[in-house]
Amino acid sequence: MDPIRNPYAPGAGQRPPELAGRDEQLDAFDVVLERVARGRPERSIVLTGLRGVGKTVLLNALRSAAVRAGWGTGKLEARPDQSLRRPLSSAVHQAVRELGPAGGAGDHALGVIRSFAQREPVAATRGGAAPKLRDRWNPGISVPAVAGRADSGDIEIDLVELLSDLGGMAADTGRGIAVFIDEMQDLEPDDVSALCAAAHEISQTGLPLIVVGAGLPHLPAVLSASKSYSERLFRYSRIDRLDRAAAEAALVRPAQEEGAEYAADALAALYAATGGYPYFIQAYGKAVWDRAPGSPITAADVEVAAPEAESELAVGFFGSRFERATPGEREYLRAMAEVAAASGADEMDAVPTADVAAHLERKPQSLSPARDALLKKGLIYSGERGLIAFTVPHFGRYLRDHT
């Protein structure tokens, strides 16, 4: 098959040629946009799922839907140990530019964004120390900061004021603002609390502003630990692997656009190999296309190409994550994989931390540093006290086969 015409796209956050199996989320978001536009109450949205299920792709697709609806949009990616203040300022600045109101309410909104962006935290001003250069960062807004608005230094107060003013400005234009936050579980605790408080205020006032977040499966627990009402504040949508029909559509429709077909046995073999995970579907689809001599693509072609796909995943998807772990953390990961295999459970099921400690013949307390570091690096997550699971599908299999 001609590699130049290969339609598959196994890239991080890269939209596949066929966004299969996500019609429910896309249709529900269209309803949210329309309801908000009509002044109806709606909740902000949180997408959760493992690595490789397409959360970022779906987040970008939802943002495109908001743009088509005439909304102002901005997106940021949360990072550990990074304040929400600056990346959020950039995101909402872009949203205001997309709405394009000149003068009046538009200038006021930009001034509030500037005051929010430039205000260092309260703790940084204690003792009379002068703000550091990084605290005098200029967000690229020409209008002056609005004194006394979103500039207290308390992130919760400031964020409520910022989003309230932006929501009011959007209402004046007859449109809305959507803020998209990827890797939302990496927000600092104070920022999570502030975001929940701001979303709560917006929902009560009915302003046309929503937050759409995406993160790992434990994100709902992170939000709930911050504000108890977060369980009712957001509309949660779990993004999972594709079913057989959607997985086949993700392979077949792009191939048909290029005049190629799959034999039934090839599709069965690909679903068995990928488990329906969107990233794996793209990786295997690309490898099989490049190796197949012609159409229709057969199960024999899949067998020939599988080692190439597995090698690509071992380096770019699994290996890059494994290399981030220290020797002690790698030992913990291997033990998780071995405990899961010994129990006969699905490899994505959570395993008891006590069983991991017993497997390593260590006290659970002595393993806390390694476990906590892996949680912070996003390689594992804890959806329930005493249980731990991989954030990456098929990671246990990789660890057993390659380490």
Image: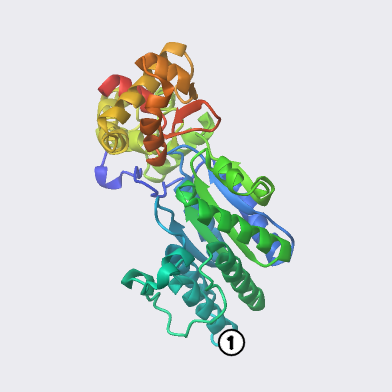
Residue 229: percent from left, percent from top: 68, 48
Quarter residue 137 falls in? bottom left
Q: Is residue 340 something one can see in this rendering?
A: no
Q: Is residue 92 left or right of residue 312?
A: right
Q: Is residue 181 something one can see in this rendering?
A: yes
Residue 265: percent from left, percent from top: 41, 22
Mark 1 residue crowding within 10 angstroms, few (<14) / some (14–19) / many (20+):
few
User: Where is 141 relative to 354, above or below?
Assistant: below
Residue 289: percent from left, percent from top: 30, 36
Q: Amino acid at mark 1?
A: Gly
Residue 93: percent from left, percent from top: 47, 72
Residue found at x 53% / y 84%: 107
Reading the image, the residue beneath label 1 is 104
Q: Quick one: 236 or 389, which is closer to the camera?
A: 389
User: Where is 219 relative to 126, above or below?
Assistant: above
Say which element carries label 1: loop
What scheme was used to colour the molecule?
A: rainbow
Residue found at x 54% / y 40%: 239
Q: Quick one: 111 or 251, which is closer to the camera?
A: 111
- Image quadrant holding the C terminus, namely top left
User: Where is 128 relative to 84, above or below?
Assistant: below
